[in-house]
Amino acid sequence: MQVSSIVFASRIQRFRLPRVCVAVVGEDASNIIDRAESLVRDNPFMEFRLDYLANPAAGLPKLKHFLDLHPEATVIATCRRVVNGGKFKGSAAAQLDILTKAAATGFQLVDIELQSAEILKSGELAQLKDRVGVILSFHDFKATKRLEETFAAMKQYPADFYKVVSTATSLYDNVQMMKFVQAHSAQHEMVGLCMGEQGIISRVLGVRAGSVFTFAAATRGEETAPGQVTAGELRDTYRIEMVDAATQVYGVAGDPVSHSLSPIMMNAAFRRETVNAVFLALHAKTMKDLMACVPDIPIRGLSITMPYKQDIVHSLSNSDALTKQVGACNTVVRGQEGKLYGFNTDVAGVVVPLEQRIALQGAKVLVVGAGGVARAAVFGLKNKGAEVFIVNRTPEKAQALAKATKAKYLKRADVAKASFDVIINATPLGMGSNRQSPLEDKELNTKFLFDLVYVPAETKLMKMARAKGIQVIPGLEMFVQQGARQFEIWSGKPAPIAEMSFVVSKALERLAAGSVEVEEAPPPNKPQPRAEEKAAPKPKPSAKPAVKAAARKATKPAAKPAKKAAKKPAKR
Ligand code: NAP
């Protein structure tokens, strides 16, 4: 088949098209129309998945009614065959017939796979293209590979848009995809993205590399491809309509990382302070993968979370005194020359909320736990002159930390006999659906309890403390304070702490109500299911409540100190 040159009409379409196309699915045409009616105002660019209908051709007259009523909408008709990951059981010829009818119905664009184009008779695709805008697509549900080879095959066929969708099995696959799109976007109208949880970079930054648009789900639970995010998230959290060549890229890197509320918090901060930046969740399965992406994307700053807080130290050119003291780094800045500089803001995350309430000099503080966060807490508290005690499930670890920090080791049996100004929970007990408490009621002899767990907003330990009249500091405050310091390091502006606290509180409320699925971090060694390993996309069942705890009550106390803190210039 001959390659047709890019027609003028498609050039116009390119500049007319919004950046986000929302995939609409339904069991029947009425269902699709109902969904489309509720979406069209905010999402005038949609894809109707005709292959989800039992009889796609029979549904077209009803869909025509919607298209006639909404001339402002641009709608793609897609009838993906089963062999290519869709639900349409018919042949390529039957698919062509439906897409031709869809063109007559008023759809402005149709999507047809390379594999179907290869089966069709010579000239049939060109005839379809004479009637309607054609998106020639290719999907790889397993990997990101042979992109150039695939595109060479695709270019043999006439199309208005060439869409290549692969699956990211590493963060670097996003870089490959964006380089590929960039290489061809001057000559062709390209759409390129990676599926899978690790594909979020290409979904947000693909448009910067030259992808004309990207795809999104209408809501959680209506995804038509693994790793698809919602249109609301793309627009509101990631501000995709604003992403341009000057947009600075930041991210939280860890494994797992899908549970992180950092993207919600940091993107809200960037928006509030009008910083042209976007913050992504980077699921790095290895440090090597992460480090390969940093110069190529390029990433300007990283928030480092488990399990890389210690490992990252070896990749830093220099670091602040706290990183050196604690031996862990949670904040990275990439300098203009490409070198990485490390900071530790976890310490401030623990210390600042306490200092807003009590003088730490001489305060008696019990830290429960001897892991990474406990280490940051103990160093920070000792630096402020507090008398610090450490208790831990594994006594040897507590003893080692106490020795390294000149704190005191406390046997678990002695906790109930002592009293403190502050008790800090630095264990995961109480996190997610874990309903345990690290201490018993009789061991809670303290004025303040600071539970560093922040999902859910109200833990069993916090409830026990409130019942005893102990003042509770929620883990949300640490989360916000460490993030605030990060924001200041990256942007040089004071952090909008009240805004950051508000969006995280709201996210926790939605989480408790079950409308947001934020996965819990699994216990160490328990592998996460990998979305990108799914053979083909299936719509997920509606998001189920991950955590049922009543967050409403719990998030209120957090709002006050955060507002207070917002008035004060943020301390470093
Ligand atoms: P970590 O390095 O894995 O340390 C976990 C600590 O908890 C260890 O001392 C461990 O004891 C103890 N522990 C684990 N499971 C336990 C159990 N079943 N019973 C008793 N003790 C147990 O984790 P981390 O990075 O320090 O994080 C700890 C928690 O802090 C996280 O789970 C998270 O909820 C919270 N956190 C909050 C924020 C925030 O911004 N609010 C930030 C980071 C972390 P052993 O030594 O005996 O293993």
Image (cartoon, rainbow, N blue to C red):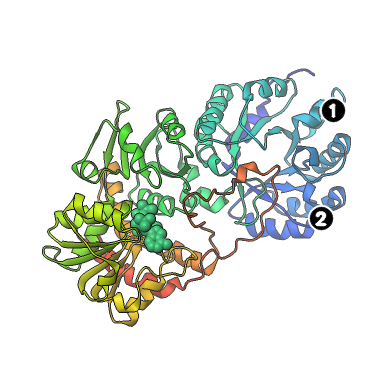
**From the viewer's perspective, is residue 322 above or below residue 156?**
below
Whether the residue under disc 1 has CB within 8 Å of ligand 1: no
Dot 1 amino acid type:
Ile
Which numbered circle lies on residue 234?
Answer: none
Dot 2 amino acid type:
Lys
Give the camera-side residue of 268 and 253.
253
Quick one: quadrant of the N terminus? top right
Q: Residue at the spot x=26%, y=47% of the render?
A: 493
x and y percentages locating residue 406 in the rendered image: 16, 54
Q: Residues within 10 Å of mark 1 (few under 14, many from 20)?
A: few
**From the viewer's perspective, is residue 227 above or below residue 5?**
below
x and y percentages locating residue 129 in the rendered image: 77, 30
- Dot placed on the residue nearer the N-terminal end, 2 or 1: 2
Give the camera-side residue of 170 and 40.
170
Q: Residue at the spot x=60%, y=56% of the render?
A: 220
Q: Which residue is mark 1?
A: 119
Local secondary structure at mark 2:
helix
**From the viewer's perspective, is residue 187 above or below residue 539?**
above
- Tag in front: 2 or 1: 1
x and y percentages locating residue 143 in the rendered image: 63, 33
Q: Which picture quadrant has residue 561?
A: bottom left
Give the camera-side residue of 104 and 121.
121
Residue 76 visible, this orientation = yes
* Left-right relation of 423 to 54: left
Residue 503 visible, this orientation = no
Give the camera-side residue of 406 and 193.
406
Instruction: Tell me whether the residue at label 2 lies in contact with that at label 1, contact meaning CB atoms closer than 8 angstroms.
Output: no
Q: Which picture quadrant has residue 74?
A: top right
x and y percentages locating residue 280 in the rendered image: 45, 44
Local secondary structure at mark 1:
helix
Q: Which residue is mark 2?
A: 62
Disc 2 and disc 1: Cα gap in Å?
30 Å
